[in-house]
Amino acid sequence: MPYVDGMITDLERQALGCFAKNIWEHGASKEAVIVDGGCYVGASTVALAEGLHESKVPEQKRRGRIWSYDLFRTTKAMADHYLKGSGLQAGDSFQPIFEKNVAAYRDYVRLEAGDIQKAQVPEAPVAILFIDILWSWDCTNYVGRRFYPLLEPGRSLLIHQDFVYPFYPWVILTMGQLSNILLFAYNVQYSSVVFDVAKRVREQDIDDPRNVEVSRGLNIYDQFIDRVEGWAQGALALGKALYLASLNRIEEARRLTEEVAVKFATEPLVTQYLEAIRGYCDRAVAEGKPVPLDQAVGI
């Protein structure tokens, strides 16, 4: 298979492939499917498909086993960086690139193109729920209510690819709310965090993370900062700073940002975010209030 140059690291690809190969031998239901939520140009899809291909699942039962979701709409950042040279402009579809990249495993994939909040949801249990598509509070609530209940206790895995990315507080807060149901297992370098399923998630267990009291929200951040290591602690601390700034607690946010800047001064995986977070704080002061974070994704 050709190498697919996506937004996940080689270690994350290896982890996805390992999970898809072995989860059936560790109790996953025979009829369970894999959800590839945010497949982009197919790096995660191919990794999962390669693992499924090496698994003991019979070939005829691999067909359509991977449900891949994406809006397939090129953003400016994609056009300027990730898809530079492709000729695609913001607003264009990159689905043809995905189709080409996954062609060897296309029979394994059921593609759901468009807004995941309007797409089909599997009726079968989900063995692996890989999520890289939570760009807003509302999408996070939707995925939690529709997909998390499909996870089976002791049989399924939930993987958040953007967990240590500072700009998505809804991911951190939601997983904090569910910390007695979905258990932090480990951080796959660099961004993905794997969660074990201790109990079945009910739709009523999903509460909008915007309802979290600030003190509890900060405590959730602190707990997860303690669970990760190295540069990931700095990235999550900057996420905490951004969360504070979004609540108009600008001085606290700035103070924490500068503490992180000093502590992780030689770590580019942390310092790459400093300018954006400082800019968010400056803009909040200039405009008299912070921009809602799901209107400032990718700042």
Image (cartoon, rainbow, N blue to C red):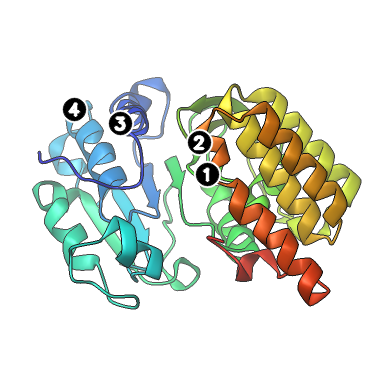
Left or right of 125 in this view: 219: right
Q: Where is residue 236 in the image (x, y as percent from the top left)?
A: 65, 38
Local secondary structure at mark 3: helix
The residue singled out by tag 4 in the image is 54
At a point 28% along the width and 39% down the height, the residue shown is: 48
Mark 4 or mark 2, earlier in chain: 4
Name the front one of labels 1 and 4: 1
Q: In which quarter of the image is the N terminus?
A: top left
The residue singled out by tag 1 in the image is 272
Mark 3 or mark 4, earlier in chain: 3
Mark 2 or mark 3, earlier in chain: 3
Local secondary structure at mark 4: helix
The residue singled out by tag 3 in the image is 10
Disc 2 crowd, CA 10 A, few/some/many (<14, 14-19, 20+): few
Compare residues 35 and 236 and report the one nearer the observer. 236
Disc 3 crowd, CA 10 A, few/some/many (<14, 14-19, 20+): some
**Callout 3–callout 1 Cβ contact below 8 Å:** no
Question: In this rendering, does residue 181 appear at all?
Answer: no
